[in-house]
């Protein structure tokens, strides 16, 4: 199930959630702040739970420091 996803992240949100799709990107809200990669870790954890795969199956390919990310789900 190797799949690439465009993801738009909103860090510092009031709750963690996958909030649907907009302009071809999956909208993800996380409570973590973007400092020290905490938001990226929260996104990976949330997507792993959403897709029912282990967290090690989620990899950020591009956009480590951006809100727009390309993520691989294995």
Image: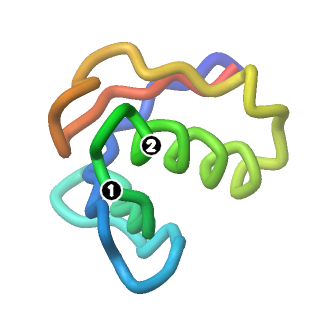
Quick one: quadrant of the N terminus? top right
Which of the numbered marks, if any, corresponds to residue 38? 2
As displayed, is residue 53 above or below residue 26?
Answer: above
Q: Residue at x 43, y 75 (%)?
A: 19
Q: Residue at x 19, y 45 (%)?
A: 67
Q: Is disc 1 in contact with disc 2, using a CB cutoff of under 8 Å?
A: yes
Which of the numbered marks, if any, corresponds to residue 33? 1
Along the polypeptide, which appears first: circle 1 or circle 2? 1
Q: Residue furthest front?
A: 36
Q: Position of residue 73 (x, y in %)?
A: 61, 27
User: How dense is the environment of label 2, judged by Cα within 10 Å: few (below 14), some, or many (20 and up)?
Assistant: some
Q: Position of residue 70 (x, y in %)?
A: 33, 27
Quick one: quadrant of the C terminus? top right
Q: Residue at x 44, y 69 (%)?
A: 31
Element carrying mark 1: loop
User: How dense is the environment of label 1, judged by Cα within 10 Å: few (below 14), some, or many (20 and up)?
Assistant: some
- Position of 51 with respect to 39 (left or right) is right
As displayed, is residue 56 above or below residue 68?
Answer: above
As displayed, is residue 61 above or below residue 12?
Answer: above
Element carrying mark 2: helix
- Position of 56 with respect to 59 (left or right) is right
- Position of 23 with respect to 54 (left or right) is left
Q: Position of residue 32 (x, y in %)?
A: 42, 59
């Amino acid at each position: 199930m190797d799949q690439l996803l465009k993801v738009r992240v909103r860090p510092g949100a009031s709750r963690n959630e996958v909030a649907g799709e907009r302009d071809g990107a999956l909208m993800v809200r996380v409570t973590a702040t973007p400092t020290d990669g905490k938001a990226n870790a929260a996104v990976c954890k949330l997507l792993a739970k959403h897709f029912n795969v282990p967290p090690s199956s989620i990899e950020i390919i591009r956009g480590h420091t951006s809100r727009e990310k390309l993520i691989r789900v294995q």
